[in-house]
Image (cartoon, coloured by chain):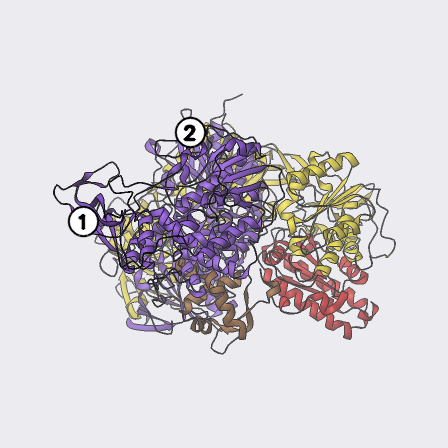
Chain colours: A red, B brown, C purple, D yellow
């Protein structure tokens, strides 16, 4: 909700609003992200979502690829305990995050470029808040992260 | 003119249907900055629980929103949404 | 063959589970839900015990599946009106599709209608804690995500308006501050907005439901308010000038009927010319109604609406030859010449100088050619509105004495009551039960008096009024110089040289419905066909005439038996809303604004008497509208909808389907917490129900977080009172009533524990105390969940709460016996109290089955299970099964299992009826 | 499968996709999208994307007119890929898959880009940003669509028979339920007699039905149904096969012992519970006049007058609740049925002998729902209820005269210390999970923290386990009363029938696949799959993983586990996701 208080995103950051890749899940977090839209909550248009059946199926290589290709951050909107597929879904997603962060580090990229949080099907405000905070964090990272200078 | 009815137990339908009526008055109250529900109620001369219905209705439909911090007394303050982004 | 193998009534979690599982087995299922979305109550909950997973995340996939399953036909906003056993063991179900007024296929769920809607009502999906709109989508996760318009019927004000003006609509627009839109809504019916805002006798106000309570809304003056606002600011009517369609219509007469018809026809693209015999346009409005009631400038402004969109008005242009007009190039002609003639007294002396027809008198005054009454004594004969206008005008012209002579009594006066009252205030005197015998004159032929005879009132005549009969020898003379005759008016029907047939009373013969005369291209509307009526009826006639002329010119039929949807009716009105049910929606009535009282008459001149409403008065008055029909028909949603999905002409439809089996999954009702008055729900603003707390905790909550509804404070000390409405057979506090529910509601302990955990998560500083009888946590991981809440810091205190009282600051005092510590009477203070309300049977289920096939209920009015030990879910009717809480309180898991049990038996029933191949 | 190159090797990734003919439709949604996104610019921007043949805007893609136009375009241009950029796929994926299907296109070659909920509506404050994002979203979906394949739902023939393990009331009623829906049943009972616990009971709550009679009635019904094959003194010893088609071995302890092989589609485990057995000295266990709840029920069931125990009349008795339940260091769970069962017994005891004094020493009385009526009745019959503190359970001792005494603190009368002399102590013992290690191993049954079998989801799928087609019913899943156990058994019937009734099951084809050339069989995926859908396969002399299309649930959980990147999830392949990522970004350089 707080983004709308500020100037339009593109005005604030020009065309350089951080691009954020979000992995969501078809049944749980993607509906939550939809709901943020239905409520007209604002966040940066740099945010783009790919929806999967379950966040346990994310390959760390996708995350590395995304960051190398130009996404400044990747956000995993995980199911948490609601996942109907895997009871240990959250644990698996955490392992993927840990592995991907290791790979990021190995590539000289800040591990903070990857974030994960549980987003449920009604977590609209929560998602918007995460996106705003993550956009800000990634913008701040541009000045501190050498890798940011690549683009 | 009779005084407006401020009976404590007006039916909630009576109160709720006045939300469109109160919209401009509440936005006027908020024109000098954010206020809490009791403050808005006082400015309107109406009971706080009635103001609560109106404030929450206006919030729901995008006219006003809360300010993040809570007052020391435990109240949120509400501010008008900029004109361009209103419904 | 049946239409469906199974009918599932109710789409809560048990209903959805039943429908989906039967569908998976390959049976054809009809799932019927009365609300606008499937999902029942579970979708409205925050998280669910004991796993604290999100209710929505569990429900929404099931909801989507219910709608998309190839074997399940899901009907929302639809009710089952009855189920009857058919001879062969199947069932016939009557299904009533309630109109959504929204085309489901076209609606994209964008909510623009909801944003535009001007009517706010309590949102039942948020436990009445916030407003929704009359146009709404049930809740954010609704399936299907389609809007619905709540319409209970047409509001009485709108319904009764002879002109078809959407009174409720403009009232609700003014309430929202949309004054110009209010003006435009009236303008849609007639150009005479300012006129009707003053001179209409407002039948709407007579029907106003608020009128039966504290007094009517000033509906007419609200219209005037909108008109005044518009004319003060605007240049022209503010509507687009239509593209000419190439056809021309002549309108004979520029009174309210003619002007309205011309306006409507011109907006459809017709070239319209009004021919007016008088030197000024406006007919009755300009030549009869006195300026103190209707200032001529207002009529001018209204007429300028008509000319602004291209209507030509030729004054001093009397028409007598209609065929000639036709050959001048007009495709149709509307005769709307009104009533020109005053009825004669029919007594000797009528030709004396000083006897004037009421209409002629008013017309002369308006045109400045009238008589000089200064210092004269005037008698007005008659009791109608023209008589009042004449009398009050006479006063204003300086008459020394003005007397109205009427042959019946005061209560029989046909004039509008306010007119009579105003006339008396102006100084007019009345003499009742007198009839003129002859007009007395002097040798010069001037009137000197009116000889009258006293009348006695006999039995009521056909009109219901008592018939006046002369009293022999009671004659007397009223001295006067002027007699104004206002006992009736008649049209000048013969003016058209016999081309149009004329009734005995002088009115033209035209079809009452189509307004077409025997000459097809000639239509007749207004007083010339109806006889003298009033402006608003004439406006309605004008609208109808335009509608019919348009139909005729487009080659559409004008005859046939009237039926809904035949295109004859202009307004998509629903039946009149049921007033008792409107009044039944509220427990208490009390208007927010002050009653607007009529202003006392001003000076005795021709300046307008009635003061305008101030903006504050208008807004406040409009705020009192009860929204009888719920939807106000203001049309804002129609204008806002990008996909033209809103259709106010939708109507309910009923169909009968045959089904092989029935699953009753009608769920439960929540205990109405105000039935426990000692806890103060409904009176104390910070006492809420468990369902309300669940809504406050849900991410789609009505407030921005958990707040006290009384003042928006973040609560710090929250108490729960368990067993509210459950395990309670004690009589009420006054010795009567009481709850009388010996059953445990089974899930209130658990949902309270869940809320305890969620509240402590949402408000880390909050203290939570639970007042309980027994903590009932009997289920897998339930007791562990209870222990978890205790570990988080929730306090559990055994003992029933005797009474809750409210402090001035909204805090609440709970009084109870502290039985675990010696039984002392203890008081504790909290910010907020949550009543853990239990369940009640949903007795609507009884309605489903009638007559000999009544469904058997148990002693507590839940659907009885005949053999719960072996056949859970089986009812007394073979082929009818019950699933979920319709048979008694259950939590979600048990409801799903119970539905599964019912489904197994439904399938077995269906299989047993299959004829072996 | 299409592209198979590892994405970690830059440049080597994209096997050139075959030339596709894709139609792209960008919806105005009557302004809901076009007010904030320049939809024409979006259509123009993607018009020349590889494979795009048609790109246009539509006022309402979902309208009849919009669908008709798409169908005409598909036919006229021989399209083999369809992209609609409109609202959330949750609202219209079914609609547009229908368009594809009606036009002879494979429905799985349709993909939707969400440019309303996830674009126009969230960026109402930034038209340029929203438009640029929409272009990226559509490009991403086009990229994915270029790599789609025509898929058909997997059709698995299923065996219309079920195995039911356990011949208690749950298993018996389930067997009848299965048979009545037309499914064959193999009913396996370890004991010689059918009936389980209920078969040994007299009247049970809440309807006073005699347990023995209930069981006898069910057994009669079972005998009427030839499709039910009953095996007593039998055990399940082997299980092979997959979803819908299991082969189980049933060993019957006959003379000589024999093993029968049964083909079944589902397996319902209804093995019931054991009663908690208190340890020696726990509340006086071992003393002659201290009984467990089943022992006491047996005593009451066989009494035909005032209660006598070991020949002595019982004039007073105390019930001690929560023995073996709600214990922080033991069984933490509540056993659910025991409060009501005890109230029910108390009423029956009072009916046998109104003068018998009954003391109920409890923590919370959990006679939930309608069972509350029994609690009320028990109190009305004169039973005394004493609430003791959670942390101070009653103490049973032997008095000097040989009688029993129970010491308890009564919270309801001001924490008074009571010493109650009684003739009998009844320990209200709860339910404990039954030991079934062999079967647990055989069926891979998941066990919860409380030791009972675990369902996959308490609300979504309360009788299903992680193992497809293996269901749990009755008290083996958790404490339940008899009627509740029957309900869950019938729910398991329903769950079985929902899969087996039609004889074929249509499954979503979006499942995981293994590239055998890459697979080196390390076994990690097998461990990662909770559904047991992955197995080792010998292929051309190599050991590789194979994924059962019927067993796979399509979660993709195995995809990142594979060190060789040999697993792909259909519809979400490595190549597709990578193409989407690239497409989402392309607007920046466009």
Q: Secondary structure at mark 1?
A: strand
| Residue D508 located left or right of residue C41 | right
Read off the chain for label 1.
Answer: C
- Quickly name the residue at label 1: C477
Q: Seen in the image, is C472 located left or right of residue D195?
A: left
Which residue is denoted by mark 2 in the rendering? C501
Nearest the viewer among C76 and C534 is C534
The numbered disc on residue C342 is none
Q: Quadrant of the N terminus of chain D?
A: top right
Query: Counting residues from the N terminus, which is met first, the one under dot 1 or under dot 2?
Result: 1
Which residue is found at the position 54% from the left and 75% from the top? Answer: B32
Q: Position of residue B69 (x, y in %)?
A: 55, 74
In the image, what residue occupies the spot 33% across and 32% down? C851
Chain of the residue on which disc 2 is drawn: C
Tell me: residue C170, above or below residue C718: above
Q: Residue at x 87, y 53 (%)?
A: D12
**C179 or C367: nearer the viewer:** C367
């Amino acid at each position: 909700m707080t983004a709308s208080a500020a100037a339009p995103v593109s005005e604030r950051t020009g065309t350089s609003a951080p691009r954020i890749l979000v992995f969501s899940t078809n049944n749980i977090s993607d509906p939550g992200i939809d709901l943020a839209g239905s409520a007209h909550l604002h966040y940066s248009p740099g945010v783009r979502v790919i929806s999967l059946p379950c966040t346990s199926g994310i390959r760390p290589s996708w995350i590395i690829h995304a960051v190398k290709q130009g996404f400044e951050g990747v956000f995993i909107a995980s199911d948490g305990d609601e996942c109907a597929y895997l009871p240990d879904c959250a644990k698996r997603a955490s392992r993927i995050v840990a592995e991907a962060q290791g790979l990021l580090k190995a590539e000289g990229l800040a591990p903070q470029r990857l974030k994960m949080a549980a987003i449920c099907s009604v977590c609209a405000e929560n998602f918007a808040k995460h996106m705003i905070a993550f956009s800000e964090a990634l913008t701040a990272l541009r000045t501190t992260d050498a890798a940011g200078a690549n683009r | 003119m009779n005084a407006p009815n401020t009976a404590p137990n007006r039916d909630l339908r009576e109160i709720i249907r006045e939300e469109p009526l109160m919209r401009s008055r509440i936005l006027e109250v908020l024109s000098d900055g954010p206020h809490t529900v009791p403050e808005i109620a006082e400015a309107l001369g109406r009971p706080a629980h009635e103001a609560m219905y109106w404030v929450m209705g206006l919030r729901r439909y995008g006219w006003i929103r809360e300010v993040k911090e809570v007052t020391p007394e435990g109240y949120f303050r509400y501010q008008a949404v900029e004109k361009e982004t209103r419904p | 063959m049946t239409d469906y193998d199974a009918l599932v009534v109710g789409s809560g979690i048990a209903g959805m589970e039943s429908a989906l599982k039967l569908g998976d087995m390959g049976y054809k299922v009809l799932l019927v839900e009365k609300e606008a979305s499937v999902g029942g109550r579970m979708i409205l909950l925050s998280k669910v015990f004991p796993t604290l997973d999100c209710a929505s995340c569990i429900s929404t996939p099931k909801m989507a599946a219910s709608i998309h399953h190839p074997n399940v036909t899901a009907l929302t906003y639809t009710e089952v009106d009855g189920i009857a056993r058919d001879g062969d063991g199947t069932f016939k179900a009557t299904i009533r599709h309630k109109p959504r007024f929204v085309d489901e296929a076209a609606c994209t769920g964008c909510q623009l209608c909801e944003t535009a809607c001007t009517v706010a009502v309590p949102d039942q999906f948020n436990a009445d804690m916030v407003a929704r709109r009359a146009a709404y989508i049930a809740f954010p996760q609704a399936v299907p995500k389609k809007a619905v318009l709540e319409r209970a019927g047409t509001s009485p004000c709108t319904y009764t308006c002879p002109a078809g003006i959407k009174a409720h609509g403009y009232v609700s627009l003014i309430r929202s501050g949309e004054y110009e839109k209010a003006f435009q809504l009236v303008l849609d019916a007639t150009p005479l907005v300012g006129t009707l805002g003053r001179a209409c006798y407002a039948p709407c106000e007579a029907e106003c439901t608020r009128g039966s309570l504290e007094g009517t809304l000033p509906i007419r003056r609200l219209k005037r308010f909108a008109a005044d606002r518009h004319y003060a600011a605007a240049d022209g009517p503010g509507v687009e000038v239509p593209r000419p369609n190439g056809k021309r219509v002549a309108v004979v007469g520029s009174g309210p009927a003619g002007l309205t018809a011309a306006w409507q026809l011109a907006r459809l693209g017709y070239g319209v010319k009004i021919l007016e015999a008088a030197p000024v346009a406006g007919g009755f409005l300009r030549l009869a109604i006195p300026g103190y009631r209707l200032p001529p400038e207002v009529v001018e402004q209204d007429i300028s609406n008509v000319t602004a969109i291209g209507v030509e008005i030729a004054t001093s242009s009397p028409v007598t030859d209609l065929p000639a007009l036709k050959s001048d190039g007009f495709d149709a002609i509307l005769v709307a010449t009104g009533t020109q003639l005053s009825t004669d007294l029919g007594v000797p002396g009528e030709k004396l100088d000083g006897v004037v027809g009421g209409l002629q008198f008013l017309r002369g005054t308006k045109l400045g050619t009238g008589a000089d009454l200064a210092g004269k004594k005037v008698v007005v004969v008659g009791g109608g509105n023209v008589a009042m206008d004449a009398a009050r005008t006479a006063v204003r012209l300086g008459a020394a004495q003005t007397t109205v002579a009427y042959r019946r009594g005061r209560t029989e006066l046909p004039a509008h009551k306010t007119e009579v009252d105003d006339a008396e205030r102006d100084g007019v005197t009345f003499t009742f039960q007198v009839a003129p015998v002859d007009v007395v004159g002097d040798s010069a032929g001037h009137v000197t008096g009116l000889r009258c005879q006293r009348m006695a009132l006999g039995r009521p005549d056909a009109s219901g009024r008592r018939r006046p009969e002369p009293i022999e020898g009671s004659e007397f003379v009223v001295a006067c110089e002027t007699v104004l005759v206002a006992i009736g008016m008649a049209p000048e029907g013969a003016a058209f040289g016999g081309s149009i047939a004329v009734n005995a009373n002088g009115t033209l013969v035209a079809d009452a419905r189509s307004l077409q005369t025997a000459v097809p291209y000639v239509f007749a509307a207004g007083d010339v066909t109806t006889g003298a009526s009033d402006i608003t009826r004439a406006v309605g006639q004008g609208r109808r005439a335009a509608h019919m002329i348009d139909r005729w010119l487009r080659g559409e039929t004008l005859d046939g038996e009237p039926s809904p949807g035949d295109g004859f009716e202009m307004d998509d009105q629903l039946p009149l809303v049921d007033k008792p049910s409107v009044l039944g929606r509220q427990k208490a009535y009390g208007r927010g604004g002050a009653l607007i009282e009529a202003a006392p008459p001003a000076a005795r001149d021709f300046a307008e008497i009635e003061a305008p409403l101030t903006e504050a008065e208008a807004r406040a008055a409009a705020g009192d509208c009860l929204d009888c029909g719920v939807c106000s028909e203001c049309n804002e949603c129609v204008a806002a909808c990008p996909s033209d999905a809103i259709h106010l002409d939708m109507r309910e439809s009923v169909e009968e389907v045959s089904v092989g089996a029935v699953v009753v999954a009608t769920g439960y009702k929540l205990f109405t917490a105000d039935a426990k008055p000692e806890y103060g729900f409904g009176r104390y603003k910070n006492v809420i129900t468990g369902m309300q707390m669940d809504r406050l905790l849900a991410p789609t909550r009505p407030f921005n977080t958990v707040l006290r509804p009384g003042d928006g404070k973040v609560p710090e000390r929250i108490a729960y009172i368990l067993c509210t409405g459950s395990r309670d057979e004690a009589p009420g506090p006054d010795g009567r009533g009481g709850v009388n529910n010996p059953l445990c509601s089974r899930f209130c302990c658990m949902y309270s524990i869940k809320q305890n955990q969620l509240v402590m998560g949402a408000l880390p500083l909050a203290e939570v105390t639970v007042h309980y009888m027994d903590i009932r946590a009997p289920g897998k991981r339930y007791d562990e969940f209870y222990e978890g809440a205790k570990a988080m810091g929730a306090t559990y205190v055994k003992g029933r709460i005797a009474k809750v009282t409210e402090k001035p600051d909204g805090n609440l005092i709970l009084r109870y016996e502290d039985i675990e510590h010696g039984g002392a009477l203890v008081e504790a203070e909290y910010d907020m109290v949550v009543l853990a309300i239990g369940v009640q049977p949903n007795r609507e289920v009884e309605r489903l089955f009638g007559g000999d096939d009544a469904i058997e209920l148990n002693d507590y009015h839940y659907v009885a299970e005949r053999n719960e030990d072996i056949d859970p879910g089986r009812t007394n009717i073979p082929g009818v099964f019950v699933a979920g809480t319709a048979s008694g309180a259950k939590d979600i898991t048990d409801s799903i299992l119970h539905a599964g049990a019912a489904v197994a038996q439904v399938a077995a029933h269906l299989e047993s009826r299959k004829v072996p191949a | 499968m299409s592209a198979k190159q590892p994405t970690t090797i830059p440049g080597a990734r994209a096997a050139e996709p075959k030339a596709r003919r894709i139609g792209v439709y960008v919806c105005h949604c009557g302004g809901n999208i076009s007010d904030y996104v320049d939809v024409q610019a979006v259509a123009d921007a993607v018009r020349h994307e590889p494979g795009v043949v048609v790109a246009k805007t539509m006022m309402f893609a979902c309208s009849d007119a919009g669908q008709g136009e798409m169908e005409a375009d598909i036919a006229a241009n021989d399209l083999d890929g369809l992209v609609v950029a409109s609202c959330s796929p949750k609202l219209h994926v079914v609609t547009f898959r229908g368009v594809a299907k009606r036009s002879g296109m494979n429905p799985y070659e349709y993909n939707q880009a969400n440019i309303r909920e996830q674009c126009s509506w969230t960026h109402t404050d930034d038209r340029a940003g929203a438009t640029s994002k929409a272009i990226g979203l559509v490009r991403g979906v086009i990229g994915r669509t270029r790599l789609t394949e025509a898929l058909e739902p997997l059709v698995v023939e299923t065996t219309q028979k079920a195995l039911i393990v356990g011949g208690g009331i749950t298993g018996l009623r389930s067997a009848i339920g299965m048979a009545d829906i037309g499914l064959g049943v193999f009913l396996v009972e370890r004991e010689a007699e059918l009936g389980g616990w209920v078969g040994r009971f007299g009247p049970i709550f809440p309807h006073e039905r005699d347990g023995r009679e209930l069981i006898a009635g069910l057994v009669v019904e079972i005998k009427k149904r030839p499709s039910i094959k009953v095996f007593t003194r039998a055990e399940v010893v082997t299980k092979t096969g997959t979803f819908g088609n299991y082969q189980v071995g049933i060993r019957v302890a006959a003379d000589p012992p024999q093993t029968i092989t049964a083909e079944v589609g589902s397996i319902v485990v209804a093995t019931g519970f054991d009663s908690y057995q208190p340890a020696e000295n726990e509340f006086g266990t071992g003393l002659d006049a201290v009984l467990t709840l089943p022992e006491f029920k047996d005593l009451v069931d066989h009494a035909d007058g005032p209660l006598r125990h070991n020949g002595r009349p019982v004039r007073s008795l105390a019930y001690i609740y929560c023995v073996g339940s709600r214990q922080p260091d033991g069984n933490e769970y509540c056993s659910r049925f025991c409060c009501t069962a005890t109230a029910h017994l108390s009423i029956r005891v009072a009916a046998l002998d109104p003068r018998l004094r009954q003391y109920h020493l409890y923590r919370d009385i959990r006679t939930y729902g309608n069972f509350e009526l029994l609690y009320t009745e028990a109190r009305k019959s004169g039973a005394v209820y004493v609430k003791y503190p959670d942390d101070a359970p009653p103490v049973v001792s032997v008095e000097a005269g040989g009688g029993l005494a129970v010491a308890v603190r009564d919270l309801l009368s001001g924490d008074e210390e009571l010493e109650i002399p009684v003739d009998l102590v009844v320990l209200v013992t709860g339910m404990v999970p039954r030991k079934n290690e062999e079967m647990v191993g055989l069926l891979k049954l998941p066990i919860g923290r409380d030791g009972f079998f675990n369902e996959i989801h308490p609300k979504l799928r309360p009788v299903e386990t992680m193992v497809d087609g293996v269901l749990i019913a009755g008290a083996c899943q958790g404490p339940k009363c008899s009627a509740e156990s029957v309900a869950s058994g019938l729910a398991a019937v329903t769950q079985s029938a929902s899969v087996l009734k039609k004889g074929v099951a249509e499954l979503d084809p979006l499942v995981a696949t293994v590239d055998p050339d890459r697979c080196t069989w390390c076994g990690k995926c097998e461990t990662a799959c909770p559904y047991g859908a992955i197995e080792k396969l010998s292929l051309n002399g190599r050991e590789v993983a194979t994924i059962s299309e019927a067993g796979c649930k399509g979660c993709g959980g195995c995809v990142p586990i594979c060190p060789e990147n040999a697993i792909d999830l259909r519809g979400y392949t490595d190549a597709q996701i990578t193409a989407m990522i690239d497409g989402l970004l392309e607007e920046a350089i466009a």
